[in-house]
Amino acid sequence: MSELKSAAEELDAADGLAALRGRFVLDDVVYLDGNSLGALPAHVPGRVQDVVRRQWGELRIRSWEESGWWTAPERIGDRIAPLVGA
């Protein structure tokens, strides 16, 4: 078993994506679900809190202009267009 563990540790050490692990909220559970949203990006809870508290709660209708809500469909469309071949 220790030989298998050593091999796994070597592969982990050589993994070019390992540095990205810190960008997500993860625990030690292996979660294999093809229908899942995936791991929660670590910045998302703070972003959601900003949208709800500041943009919606404080700025209210001004967020259409000041927070860029009005132009969001164009910005988002430009970012996802390559994913769908548009």
Image: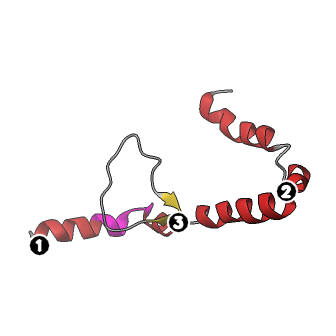
* Residue type, numbered disc 1: Ser
Q: What is the crowding at mark 1: few (fewer than 14 residues within 10 Å), some, or many (at least 20)? A: few
Residue located 73% across and 42% down the image = 76
Residue located 34% across and 70% down the image = 13
Residue located 68% across and 33% down the image = 81
Establish if 13 lies above or below 80.
below
Can you identify the residue that label 1 sits on?
A: 2
Choose mark 1 or mark 3, whichever is in front.
3
Q: Gap between marks 1 and 3, in whole Å?
A: 30 Å
Disc on the earlier residue, 1 or 3:
1
Can you identify the residue that label 2 sits on?
A: 60
Region rendered in magenta: 11-17
Which type of secondary structure does the marked residue at label 3 adopt? helix
Left or right of 10, for residue 78: right
Can you identify the residue that label 3 sits on?
A: 23
Q: Which mark is residue 70?
A: none
Left or right of 77, for residue 84: left
Which image quarter holds the N terminus? Answer: bottom left
Disc on the earlier residue, 1 or 2:
1
